[in-house]
Amino acid sequence: MVSITIDEQTLEVEAGSTVLQAAERLGIDIPTFCYMKRLPPLASCRMCLVEIEGQRRLQPSCATVVTDGMVVRTDTPLIEETRSSMLDMLLANHPLDCPICDKGGECELQNQVMAYGPRESGFRDAKRVFHSQDIRLSPVIIMNVNRCIQCQRCVRMCEEVVGAVALGTVEKGMDTAVTGFEGSLASCDQCGNCVEVCPVGALMSFPYRYKARPWDLDETDTVCPHCGTGCQLTVGTRKGEFMRVRSKWDEGLNRETLCVRGRFGLDFVASPGRIKRPMVRRDGALVAVSWDEAGNYLRQRLSGVEKKAAGGLASPRLPNEVLYQFQKLMRTVFRTNNIDCSSRWSTPVETLGPLLAGFYTRAPLQEVIGDACVLVVGGNVTEENPVTEYLLRDGARRRQTGLLMLSARPSRLEADARAVVRVLPGGEAASLAAVVAALVAAAGEDLPEDVLADIVATTGWQPAATHGEKQDPLVTALLGGARVTVLVSVEVLRSPHARAALQQLNNLLQVLSLLDKDPKMQFLFDRANQMGAWDMGVLPAALPGLAALADGAARATLERAWRAEIPSETGADFDAMLELCDQGQMGALYIAGSDPLMSYPDRAFVKRALAAADLLIVQDAFLTDTAGLADVVLPAATYGEESGTFTNNEGRAQRVCKFREPVAEARGNLEIFDFVAALQSHALLPSVQSEIFDEIARLVPAYVGLTQDGLGADGAFTKAAVAPPVGAFFAPPPLPIATDRLMLVTGNCLFHNGYLSERSEILNTVADDPYVEMGAWDAAQLGLSDGDQVVVRSAQRELTAKLKVDRRFPRGLVFVPENYRALRLNGLMRRGEYPCPVDVQKARAAVEITTVAGAWAGAETLAEDTAGRSPEPDGSGQ
């Protein structure tokens, strides 16, 4: 610690702190333009100059490191004159167009001039003008170069935090201008973080331009609905109409950053595809009716299926309170444990539960990353959890985080990684087993003898074994790190080998623990409340709190609280529910906020199964493909139309706030559950969001003690389960069978994440057309070039889209994003087969193939989409 005196106030600060940081701790305001906490100091704006005793010249406080005994003054006549002069120079060329500038009312230059600026300018020359009109850099970002004050925040944010390097400067001196490559931002992430950090109106949001003023907006702090990172954002509405999203520099794990989905993708709430009235099926078509008519119809249909099985699927995008009430509804009213929260994979609870209890770390991501060695397993962080990528990049560049990657798909983050291991699609389990074997081989003598004997007996690994060199850099880094954190993408859960992958993760974490590496683990979910869905017990074999359904004591506790019995038989996951439907054994299937006809990896099977259910109830805000098959459609509130909580990847419970009213006759999800329960003469108590949260905080161990008032702007952390790791080691899985077929994997792309984002008009303007991605070697072998229209064909179907060639892709890998509705990607896949073997060839010009948005090829495909249970609703329910 070193001592510093600022304006006659003395304090001790850590060595390496700057004068500006010390002043902030004392509550002393020093003006800045170029300084940002998460960026290295630049000291170019000269607004933060201070006097330091013993030094002849004023020094920039943002870049001056404190020395012991330093005496600083921040408010002297010389400093005041210097600040005024700097502002006078900025205003000399700055256009005085505040009345039409979107930054008016929240402009840092305005604020600084009011506080420190000259009352009269000494400059009389004509103002410098770069362009007479604003430049449209991208569909969402527009620039007025004349207003730029050369703080370089946007350039540095783009390069050092986002990693896109889409902005730069040209010329020098007073002629310096910030711009994109050749005046365009075509290759950037379109995240708008440059707009957020711009202190003036040089960079602006085109969708928000000229729509409102800050003082016109009603602003609501809430949490992003697009992925599990859990970014704080502030939504601005004007007279109930959605206007914009911004972030705050001092709140949330994201601080001032958001990704393109979070900043520009919330306009889906006003999508014209909203369901406005209940609908029931009459004469094969969905017809809009009143709530009373829908209730009478549903009561009659429910009475006819009482003797058959029931099942429920809820979206992990719904708030905790809604998910908790849904599983309570299914268990106590429908009398079933056939409940699930994912239609994309089956959750192996028996393996997942002990892993979460033993190693899952409910703590801030920055703390979990820290100076640890971080292993990212599976997926593409850049596209699935962009703001998490920002934090990982910051750790790798500024905090000496040792970043390691093990995945089939490449990502931009690999440029900052110390080691990258490319695995075969679906081969994560085998690759993790190889890493564990190499660790045991390299450090077996550091393991207790009894543990080593158990490992050898269970797995057959020998300390003297030798392994391929590909894992060597990764294993060396793991052994060299003082601490190790493992971040696991949901890509691992998609594979039929998910159970084996989780077992090998358990092996890895146990070995690291025995080697005193203090291992921590978190999932990188691509849905906003996947962690909450698990915690709330929306699973066939687990109760709220992830207690096993077979745990009689846990079941009894809930039964007393709910005053109802819970069936003791383990339920069916969604895949097994579809099997029951297909066999004619499913009575009522209740789907809330999910679209399995788009997401389940076998479109033909799920369509046949849903059509075979006696009664299909869909509760959603949007007319999805699944809703088009329903017998009853109940219009629900969407994000922003009801309050609740999400639990993010860190285990942080965060408040999701209402900022608009539900459209037309749509109702809140909790109100609809009460409506359905009442039809069967049941009452779900409590039924108010705040009271349900209080019940969760009493009955779910990880949430005990939480209060809504205690969540605050940054949320509050749920508690990690106190349970020892699984003691047993699992045998390694068989190596994946090599094949000369191309293997198709899927996931999220940067601009789309699930069916909500595709209803955003703004995201659709910046998103690429549907595409197929593969490596340069495979493309050359097939005679394909970047931008070609190609046909991807499986044993099931085929689709056509534009080819993207990525030189980093490994041989044999094909990627198609899952978030383009027109592609019907899941039609290529077959149940239980992932990754999916495919063939790729250039689309023949002579064949008529619909390529707008990459639609299905062939008339038989169009027939498949219009045949079956029903035609699309005629719009009467819209």
Image: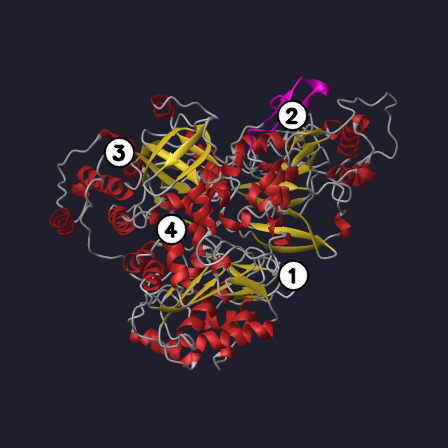
Q: Which residue is mark 2?
A: 179
Say what secondary structure mark 4 lies in. Answer: helix
Label 4 and label 2: CA atoms lie apart by 49 Å
Q: Is residue 268 above or below residue 294?
A: above
Tag 3: amino acid: Gln
Label 3 and label 2: CA atoms lie apart by 42 Å
Whole-percent x, y for residue 681 in the image: 49, 82
Label 4 and label 3: CA atoms lie apart by 40 Å
Nearer-the-camera pick, 141 or 511: 141
Q: Which residue is mark 3?
A: 471
Tag 4: amino acid: Ala
Q: Is 180 covered by the magenta stretch?
A: yes
Q: Are marks 3 and 2 in contact (CB under 8 Å)?
A: no
Tag 2: amino acid: Thr
Q: Which residue is mark 1?
A: 663
Of pointers 3 and 1, the one earlier in the residue sequence: 3
Mark 1 or 2: in front is 1
Of pointers 4 and 3, the one earlier in the residue sequence: 3
Q: Are marks 3 and 1 in contact (CB under 8 Å)?
A: no
> Disc number at residue 604?
4
Of pointers 1 and 4, the one earlier in the residue sequence: 4
Residue 614: quadrant of the picture: bottom left
